[in-house]
Image (cartoon, helix red, strand yellow):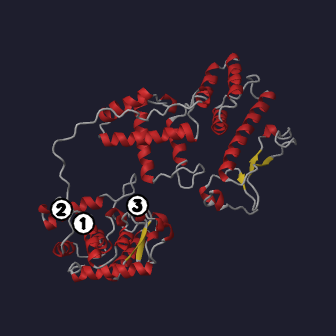
């Protein structure tokens, strides 16, 4: 049977979706398809009035993916409840006609409550009272803690939150970058260390959040005030999701609990130093300085020589080129794409010309050969430079260049010249070559002011960008920057 996803219902490609137990015949709405619990086979199906078969197939009456997911989760929770009641009726559980207090059923009730609110709370509390009277007070309290009080373990809440912040998530939430997700994990790790083993969302009060922020992070974890604010921001987002978006953290009666990470009062301003920190001025390289650097690393094919030359000829940020994956690079070296960056404009195609194109083509061939045993999506252009998993950046490049620049040009260049100065150099000569400002911004990936006509402007073609890049190359050559390229 053929299935499809309509893009107009806010959908993405099917592989990015949670399609477990969901079907979508072409031209029809979503359906639930799941194996019927054995104890229910042959009994009456409350949704159809007919006996359950070995497989339950149930229309969900919607063509919207998000609605289908919500209804599916509710129906599966109800199916679990029917199974539990049927088992009790057959004597498979000897606890008398009370609610199934298993963790699985607690999860199903929690998900049901997240979708439908507190309309079933009266029934649930009556069921829990009956369980308490039957001698299952501890189990009933644990069940209530999970369903009614949001006592969801931090680790479980973290994974659910990150799943809901991926690209194309069913809630339509803004996706998080990989580096931000790792930062959120770090924030929760600190919080778990502060609260102790077995901590849950409901354990965090306003007072505990305050002490975590003002005592634990700065005094025990010894992080800077800026990092304290970053951790607080990440945790505030996690709690906002738990309270509002998924409703897994609620008070009795279904009322919302206050977000303990919201700081309503900012307090007294901190004293600033009397002497303003002197801003560091980054210069462009002179032709003589670039020539010395190139002559100190003359051989193409080495990670150091190649990254120096590509940085000058393209103006890309060091971490952009050092972190490039081979799948984003043209095999003939004619250019590469930056898939992500600090701004929307950072996502761009970078054309290369003349010797720079030859150098890139040779590096692509060598890098492909060196990584032939790796999956294609794990191969990098500069695989020799180590990459920090948490940030996805090759930080070692800038650290190496600082030592290299001092050895080659002298320590008096400290504070004036850095790896980023290649970007300054490219931009300077792009301007001198007469490249218009908007095209410099497009090639260099700088943010630009928003204008009404931007929605109609889809940028230049690669051939046109290459023509402007050729002008920059010629300007660098005329100024003497390519003598030792």
Q: Is residue 200 visible?
A: no
Q: Is residue 148 visible?
A: yes
Asked whether 13 or 345 is in front, the reply is 345
Residue at horizontal 29 percent and vertical 62 percent from the top = 397
Quarter of the picture containing the N terminus is bottom right
Query: Circle 1 sits on which residue?
Result: 421
**Is 103 rendered above or below residue 475?**
above
Left or right, 273 with reference to 338: left
Asked if labels 3 and 2 touch by Cβ distance under 8 angstroms, the answer is: no
**Horizontal and vertical percent for residue 203?**
49, 28
Residue at horizontal 60 percent and vertical 59 percent from the top = 12
Q: CA distance from mark 2 to mark 3?
A: 25 Å
Q: Which mark is residue 341?
A: 3
Between discs 2 and 3, the one toward the N terminus: 3
In the structure shown, which secondary structural element does the residue marked by tag 3 occupy?
loop
Residue at horizontal 67 percent and vertical 37 percent from the top = 116
Quarter of the picture containing the C terminus is bottom left
In the structure shown, which secondary structural element does the residue marked by tag 2 occupy?
loop
């Amino acid at each position: 049977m053929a299935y499809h996803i309509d893009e107009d219902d806010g959908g993405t490609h099917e592989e990015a979706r949670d399609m477990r137990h969901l079907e979508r015949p072409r031209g029809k709405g979503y359906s639930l398809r799941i194996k019927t619990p054995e104890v229910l086979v042959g009994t009456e199906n409350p949704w159809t009035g007919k006996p359950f078969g070995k497989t339950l197939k149930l229309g969900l009456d919607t063509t919207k993916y998000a609605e289908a997911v919500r209804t599916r989760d509710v129906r599966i929770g109800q199916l679990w409840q029917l199974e539990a009641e049927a088992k009790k009726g057959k004597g498979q559980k000897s606890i008398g006609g009370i609610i199934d207090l298993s963790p699985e059923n607690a999860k199903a009730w929690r998900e049901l409550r997240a979708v439908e609110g507190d309309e079933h709370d009266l029934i649930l509390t009556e069921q829990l009272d009956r369980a308490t009277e039957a001698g299952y007070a501890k189990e009933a309290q644990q069940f209530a803690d999970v369903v009614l009080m949001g006592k969801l373990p931090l680790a479980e809440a973290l994974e659910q939150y990150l799943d809901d912040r991926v690209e194309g998530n069913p809630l339509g939430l803004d996706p998080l970058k990989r580096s931000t997700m790792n930062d959120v994990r770090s924030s929760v790790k600190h919080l778990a260390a502060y609260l102790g083993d077995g901590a849950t969302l409901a354990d965090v009060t306003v007072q505990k959040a305050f002490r975590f922020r003002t005592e634990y992070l700065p005094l025990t974890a010894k992080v800077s005030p800026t990092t304290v604010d970053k951790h607080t921001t990440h945790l505030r987002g996690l709690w906002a999701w738990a309270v509002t978006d998924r409703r897994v953290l609620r008070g009795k009666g279904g009322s919302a609990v206050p977000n303990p990470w919201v700081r309503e009062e900012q307090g007294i301003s901190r004293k600033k130093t009397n002497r303003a920190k002197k801003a560091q001025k980054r210069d462009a390289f002179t032709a003589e300085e670039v020539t010395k650097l190139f002559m100190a690393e003359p051989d193409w094919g080495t990670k150091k020589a190649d990254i120096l030359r590509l940085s000058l000829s393209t103006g890309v940020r060091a971490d952009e080129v050092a972190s490039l994956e081979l799948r984003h690079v043209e095999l003939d070296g004619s250019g590469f794409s930056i898939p992500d960056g600090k701004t929307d404009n950072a996502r761009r195609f970078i054309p290369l010309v003349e010797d720079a194109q030859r150098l890139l083509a040779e590096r692509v061939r060598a890098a492909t050969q060196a990584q032939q045993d790796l999956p294609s999506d794990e191969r990098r252009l500069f695989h020799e430079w180590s990459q920090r998993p948490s940030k996805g950046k090759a930080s070692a490049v800038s650290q190496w260049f600082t030592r290299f620049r001092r050895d080659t040009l002298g320590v008096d260049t400290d504070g004036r010249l850095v790896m980023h100065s290649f970007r300054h150099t490219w931009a300077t000569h792009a301007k001198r070559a007469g490249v218009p400002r908007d095209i410099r911004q497009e090639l260099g990936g700088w943010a630009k002011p928003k204008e009404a006509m931007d929605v109609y402007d889809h940028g230049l073609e690669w051939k046109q960008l290459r023509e402007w890049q050729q002008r920059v190359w010629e300007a660098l050559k005329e100024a003497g920057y390519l003598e030792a390229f």
